[in-house]
Image (spheres, helix red, strand yellow):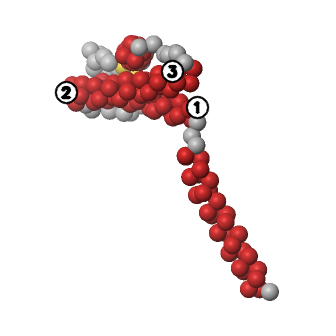
C-alpha cells in the first residue's frame, strides 16, 4: 500500500513538473501576430530607453563623444529595424501601415528626450535644480556653466 502511494505521488510530481515544458513548446509554435506585435513594441521601448540612457551617460561624462555617437548610431539602426518589423506586422494584420516613417519617429522621440533633459550631477546622476551650487543628493559641487 505504501509503495503504491509513493508511486502515485512520484507520477503526479513528474506530471506537475513536465506539464509546463510540453505546454510551452506548443505555445511557441502557435504564436499569434498580436504576441509578435507586443514583443516588437517591448523591444522598441527598450531601445528608446537605451537611447535615453546613452544620452544621460554622455551628459554625465561617462561616455566620450566618439563612443556616444557610435552607440547612438547602433541603437538608432536597431530601432529602425524594429519599427520596420512593426510596420510589417501592422501591414500583414491590418492591410495598411499605421505608423509614420521610422526615422522621423525616432528623431521625434530623441528630440523630446533631449528637451526633457535638465542638468544632472556628474557624481550621482541626481537632477540639479536651476541655481543650485551643490547636488542635493550627494553634496558634490556643480559648476554653473555645466549644462546637459
- Mark 2, Cα crowd under 10 Å, few <14 / some 14-19 / many 20+, is few
Q: Position of residue 70 (x, y in %)?
A: 24, 28
Query: 113 or 143: nearer the eye?
Result: 113
* Vertical position of residue 113 compared to residue 37: above or below: above
Q: Is residue 29 left or right of residue 140?
A: right
Whole-Å distance between the Cαs marked 2 and 3? Answer: 37 Å
- Mark 3, Cα crowd under 10 Å, few <14 / some 14-19 / many 20+, is few
Q: Position of residue 26 (x, y in %)?
A: 59, 50
Name the secondary structure under disc 2: helix
**In the rendered image, which quarter is residue 118 located in?**
top left
Name the secondary structure under disc 1: helix
Name the secondary structure under disc 3: helix
**Disc 2: which residue:** 66
Mark 2 / mark 3, whichever is N-terminal = 2
Identify the residue shown where x is 45% and y is 32%: 43
> What mark, if any, has residue 62 been given in the picture?
none
Identify the residue shown where x is 50% and y is 26%: 89
**Disc 1: which residue:** 34
**In the rendered image, which quarter is residue 61 located in?**
top left
Disc 2 to disc 3: CB gap under 8 Å: no
Mark 1 / mark 2, whichever is N-terminal = 1
Q: Is residue 14 left or right of residue 45?
A: right
**In the rendered image, which quarter is residue 105 located in?**
top left
Identify the residue shown where x is 29% and y is 29%: 74
Q: How many marks?
A: 3
Q: Is residue 9 left or right of residue 75?
A: right
**Disc 3: which residue:** 91
Is residue 95 visible from the viewing direction of this image?
yes
Dividing the image into 4 quarters, which one contains the N terminus? Answer: bottom right
- Mark 1, Cα crowd under 10 Å, few <14 / some 14-19 / many 20+, is few
Whole-Å distance between the Cαs marked 1 and 3? Answer: 13 Å
Amino acid at each position: 500500500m505504501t509503495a503504491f502511494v509513493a508511486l502515485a505521488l512520484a507520477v503526479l510530481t513528474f506530471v506537475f513538473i513536465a506539464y509546463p515544458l510540453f505546454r510551452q513548446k506548443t505555445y511557441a509554435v502557435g504564436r499569434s501576430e498580436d504576441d509578435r506585435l507586443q514583443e516588437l513594441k517591448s523591444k522598441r521601448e527598450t531601445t528608446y530607453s537605451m537611447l535615453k540612457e546613452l544620452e544621460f551617460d554622455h551628459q554625465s561624462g561617462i561616455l566620450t563623444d566618439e563612443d556616444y555617437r557610435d552607440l547612438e548610431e547602433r541603437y538608432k539602426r536597431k530601432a529602425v529595424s524594429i519599427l520596420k518589423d512593426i510596420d510589417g506586422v501592422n501591414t500583414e494584420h491590418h492591410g495598411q501601415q499605421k505608423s509614420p516613417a521610422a526615422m522621423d519617429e525616432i528623431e521625434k522621440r530623441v528630440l523630446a528626450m533631449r528637451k526633457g533633459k535638465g542638468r544632472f550631477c556628474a557624481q550621482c546622476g541626481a537632477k540639479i535644480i536651476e541655481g543650485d551650487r551643490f547636488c542635493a543628493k550627494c553634496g558634490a559641487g556643480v559648476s554653473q556653466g555645466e549644462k546637459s
